[in-house]
Amino acid sequence: MAGLSDQSVPAKFQPENTPVDELALADIKSAILVKLRLAIGKEAAFATKHDWYKAAALTLRDRMVHRWLTSDKESYDAGRKRVYYLSLEFLIGRLFTDALNNMGLLPLFEAALGDLGVGLDELRKCEPDAALGNGGLGRLAACFMESMATLGIPAFGYGIRYDFGLFRQVISHGVQQEYPDEWLGFGNPWELPRREVTYNVYFGGSIETVDDGKGRKQVIWHPGETVEAVAYDTPIVGWRGQHVNALRLWSARAPDPLRLDVFNTGDYVSASAEQARAEAICKFLYPNDESAAGRELRLRQEYFFVSASLQDLVKRHLHSDGNLRGLANKAAVQMNDTHPSLAIAELMRILVDQHNMRWDAAWQITNATLSYTNHTLLPEALETWPVELFQRLLPRHLEIIYRINEAHLDRADATRPGDTAYRASVSIIDETSGRRVRMGNLAFIGSHRINGVSAMHSELMKETVFHDLNQLYPGRITNKTNGITFRRWLMLANPKLTDLLRATCGEAVLDDPTRLIKLEAFAGDAAFQQEFRKVKHHNKLALARVIGEKLGVQADPSALFDVQIKRIHEYKRQLLNLVETVALYQAIKDEPGKDWVPRVKIFAGKAAASYRYAKLIIRLINDVAETVNNDTTIGSKLKVAFLPDYNVSLAEVIIPAADLSEQISTAGMEASGTGNMKLSLNGALTIGTLDGANIEIRDNVGPENIAIFGMTAAEVVERRAKGLDASDVINKSPNLGRAIQAIETGAFSPDDPGRYASVGHALRHLDHYVVSADFDSYYEAQRGIDTRWRAGSAWSRAAILNTARMGWFSSDRTIREYADDIWGVPVAGDLPSTTSLQARKAT
Ligand SMILES: *Cc1c(COP(=O)(O)O)cnc(C)c1O
């Protein structure tokens, strides 16, 4: 962000940068050199880039730890309520420049490392991405951690320290291959192992009910297996470095790692079998993004991290408050999706079995403490577990769930007497195909608040998945539209734009993103537009370089950069974008002399390893790219680039360079999206459906500054009800018909003409995601984009207005709403509050 002043930028669009303090500079330099010698054991002359990175990271960490201990003591002394954010995923990315920026040390470290002869940017790239998440859900957790620290909310993030993060994607001959992500291979300078913070987590065994002599039943669980959870803490520092919270990740190990007696008999493998079984729990992140992995190991992961986290927070509470009656006044536990919903049964077990609390009192505390964020309406993605598996792995928890369900079903019977269908639908136990525990229903019943992640998603929750439960517990469902941290997705990813914003909106824009609105006044200003375009061009040059290096494809930075980056999934409809690409390619070949808008179609994203159709779509994108990029008749009018191994760091390069943001999910299927927010904030126009947070983006940026197309959620439901055949629309659309025909007859796979027959068949006859049905509307919207692009100044104006009006989508705003409405915790009072443009319009 603190780029040196650029002579070519007019003074009024240049921010003032304070000069580096010489004393502080000398101090940082010597601190880094000391780390290099004492923590790494190297002389500067022999240090590798990696050694320098580690020395610099440790130097920075020291400075964070001081603030961390201060933050902790202050919250503790004040007896403040804490937030515990439970998530099986944290998609963090790199921390080095993020932490430097928030600590206000970026210019100082940049200068110090420069003096030491190593570039900060080179060192930055030594850090592997912490990819402990699949996509949006995990990235949300990472943005929330940063915003909670920024707002001074005492909080812990709880998750699993996976040995291997999300797989590394390699594209070989167009095919996705998965390789292990060894992110801990060179150690992790950010984390502090807390060997002393260890809890036993139990599985299996049997339960015994005894009379406690006072007429009350006492349940004792005799577990069959013990696993130890060990804490590893990563400090997360907020903007301006005032507050630091811990991300506490659990690693699993066996209490008895090596059976010496067995080892001595020569059976080396069996000697550590118990260790291998325990460690499997934190071995890797499940790559299944949208569908519940029906695997025992996954349930073990869920219970493992829930149990360790609850033991940890209960111990902390007892230490400060002495008893658990007031737990809900001092702790708010947020469950990110249903993965942590065992927390409901586990907290009941702790309160009732271990602390002899009465059931009703325990239930009241549990409900007041816990809340649940829903992320999906897709029925196949709602977690359920076979009762039989529960019985074997967590027998006491199953009993507790049955008891919760009993009271709950009594309530259902009282509300709708005799309505057995209603009873079956709200029950925690699904009896339709074998008996299964519904984690979504458990999470709903045990929480005082259930939130969706965009206005539309929360409304749909009330109408669909939780329709019946909402009747039984009215008022619990609330909306908290997702947000993103602007420190990472604007300041760090786009330093040139940030400089321009600081100069035009004032320095305070860094603290209060609603001040971006001041840009509105410059949206039509020719000089400002030119600066805005210069920034975009600079970022596009950088991306073009990456595309050239990785793919050998020449992307012209003056072309329209059309970007779709996200997990590959049928509902996200990369296929719709691709069919349009094919139709456009054919149209260009028909009339190569016409004045086409040059485009670079940029794709990136991973498909779950077991999701065959998504992997076929990746292959098709790459096959189409191969044909189009090598067709000399169309030259640079169209290029297609599939960038491999999408992750946070790649997103940080692509997003600032995007002109057009593809947010084209089948309406009703994307809960919110956050990629849409990152791109719009960075001055890309959105082409999108009325889905998830796209609707709120439209409401904020204005309908004239976004291209909406396609069916509404209601129209999708209506069309599906009439059947999935798409012959009707294909017969009416020659563009679509011709594109499908090329794909299905092997125009892009001449070596294997039948490769995409199944894709053609789906487009024609199984159009569940309304790709064919939405095609014409999408194609037309794209031609509208072409027209707007040609009128350069109008495009720039719309792009500037996107940036200007995205302030509301800061995750600071989202976290304020959680804090007010769900957690009941105050936030740092010195920052001005942000109000929704919508809210302002409405009043
Ligand atoms: C923001 C982000 C996502 C979520 O993208 P959507 O377009 O909302 O699905 C996924 N992966 C990474 C690496 C991200 O940064």
Image: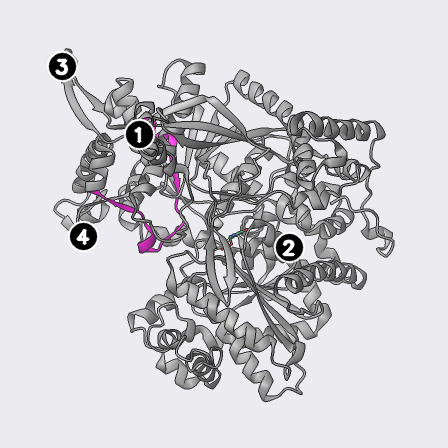
- Residue 365 included in the magenta stretch of the image: yes
Q: Residue at 38% x, 24% y: name it.
A: 199
Q: Which of marks 2 and 4 is nearer the N terminus?
A: 4
Asked if the residues shown at circle 1 and circle 4 are in contact, with their CB atoms under 8 angstroms apart, the answer is: no
Mark 4 surroundings: few (<14), some (14-19) or many (≥20) residues within 10 A: few
Please determine whether, in this image, residue 253 is positioned above or below residue 488: above
Question: Which secondary structure, mark 4?
Answer: loop
Give x and y (percent) for residue 520: 70, 56
| Residue 709 in sight in this render | no
Mark 1 surroundings: few (<14), some (14-19) or many (≥20) residues within 10 A: many
Q: Mark 2 points at which residue?
A: 653
Q: Name the residue under label 4.
A: 433
Residue in the foreground of this view, choosing between 101 and 461: 101
Q: Which of marks 1 and 4 is nearer the N terminus?
A: 1
Label 1, label 3: how many angstroms apart (C-alpha)?
Answer: 24 Å
Q: Earlier in the sequence, mark 1 or mark 2?
A: 1
Q: Residue at 70% x, 46% y: name it.
A: 122
Q: Residue at 55% x, 57% y: name it.
A: 676
Horizontal arrangement in the rendering, residue 11 relative to residue 657 (left or right): right
Residue in the foreground of this view, choosing between 417 and 130: 130
- Residue 439 included in the magenta stretch of the image: no
Q: Which of marks 3 and 4 is nearer the N terminus?
A: 3
Q: Earlier in the sequence, mark 1 or mark 3?
A: 3
Label 3, label 2: how many angstroms apart (C-alpha)?
Answer: 66 Å
Question: Which secondary structure, mark 1?
Answer: helix
Residue type at mark 1?
Glu
Q: What stretch is highlighted in magenta?
A: 364-387
Q: Is mark 4 within 8 Å of ligand 1?
A: no
Label 1, label 2: how many angstroms apart (C-alpha)?
Answer: 42 Å
Asked if the residues shown at circle 2 and circle 4 are in contact, with their CB atoms under 8 angstroms apart, the answer is: no
